[in-house]
Image: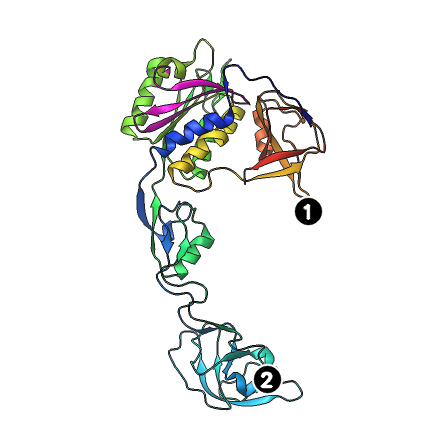
Amino acid sequence: MRITTPPAPVGLRTVEDHRASVLAAAAAVALPGEAVSIADAVGRTLAADVLARVDVPLFDNSAMDGYAVRLDDVATATEQNPVELRVIADLPAGSSEEPDLGPGEAARIMTGAPVPRSATAVVPFEHTRDGLQVWDAPAVVTRAPARPSANIRRHGEELRAGAVVAPAGGVIGPLQQTAIAITGVDTVLVRRRPRVAVISTGSELAAPGDDLARGQIPESNSVLLASLCTEAGADIVSIDSVTDEDAAFAALLDRATTDARADVVITSGGVSAGAHEVVKNVLRDRIAFVAVAMQPGRPQAFGRIGDTLVFGLPGNPASVAVSFEAYVRPALLALQGRSEQQRPTLRMPTTAGWRSPLGRTQYVPVTLDRSDPSTWSVQPAAADGSSGAHLAAGLARADAYAVVPAEVSAVAAGDLVDVMLLS
């Protein structure tokens, strides 16, 4: 990896500084909480700690199918010298019986069933001579339990009522949902989903599948942004494409911020230095237009209109995708109070080299090679192995971004690179 001290970028904002300004604005308009059923909570972000309503386990219960016994009765049991016990009860899961075991007595018990208070261990069927049999047949124990309370899950040993099951700021997945349900909680407080309006700008845009006139291209940014926002936990309230006419764009923006009550508006295109930059023409006095030291995605716009966060992203789909990951996704997660706002990043070797623009943080779509579980590697996703910002079609093969620092001018095969995982 070729490392050079770059000159201070004149007039360019760093990625970190621009992200910090975005997150500061998002923190000022964090979304309120709402109560939802745990059945509907997957994918939502907790607005408050979830506290256990009951102890876990709720009572002493058996961890095995077998026999509840008094440890003293079977402490000497071996294959050569088994111990025979009289079975006085049958305890399936859900049983409310409470048999009192006397010397030489046992109860057949199934996993999850309450353990009698007089029992001090559970012997699994595998440690008896005949295994599972009719409930009142004698139990012939061939291996002694290893310790007191063997195969018994004691009341409250995992969690006590009032303890934190899942912390605020965490996202609820199937495992968290299950843990919450186990503690007797049926309703949780989560952040409201951000309401997002997407506007693609450009007179050259045509709907995917339309016949294309000379100079037209298929519009893809709204598809990309809507999908990325949904994955980040947002609700899409409107999706529009508009020509480079100031009045038409202004009308869509007003509709998004008033009628649709969007928390976030994301535009693509119209933020650079050209002659027909519609977003800049309409919003130059209301939000900030900046150049960021990154490739792709150098021109950026961001600000607040009332309580609505407005992002102006470049028009190239690859730039849109990278800009979303760098700024929009963290903001959407911050609005939801998410404790983790960045994608996970790993360091791994690349099997191909490329050049990187000195003084600018570079985001290269890469493909992961997971064939060796002990050493993952990456290579540029573009078919020709290059890293050009315009190579949008290569996104189909990308499942991560290599993030190259501003002081690096070239990456060589075998170099370790920071890789932002997308899944």
Q: Is residue 363 visible?
A: yes
Q: How far apart are the alpha carbons under marks 1 and 2?
A: 45 Å
Q: Amino acid at mark 2?
A: Asp
Kind of residue indicated by mark 1: Ser
Where's residue 218, x and y in %? 49, 22
- Residue interval drawn in magenta: 284-311
Depth check: give the residue in front, 318 or 207: 318
Relative to 33, residue 197 above or below? above
Q: Residue at x 63, y 21 (%)?
A: 5
Using the image, tell me which numbered label, if any, was put on residue 374: 1
Check the image and tell me how it is coloured: rainbow
Q: Is residue 16 magenta?
A: no
Q: Residue at x 45, y 8 (%)?
A: 275
Q: Which residue is mark 2?
A: 130
Percent of width and height locating residue 183: 39, 61
Q: Is residue 62 left or right of residue 337?
A: right
Return the x and y of residue 333 as percentages of the image width and height.
Answer: 42, 38
Q: Secondary structure at mark 2?
A: loop
- Mark 1 vs mark 2, foreground winner is 1
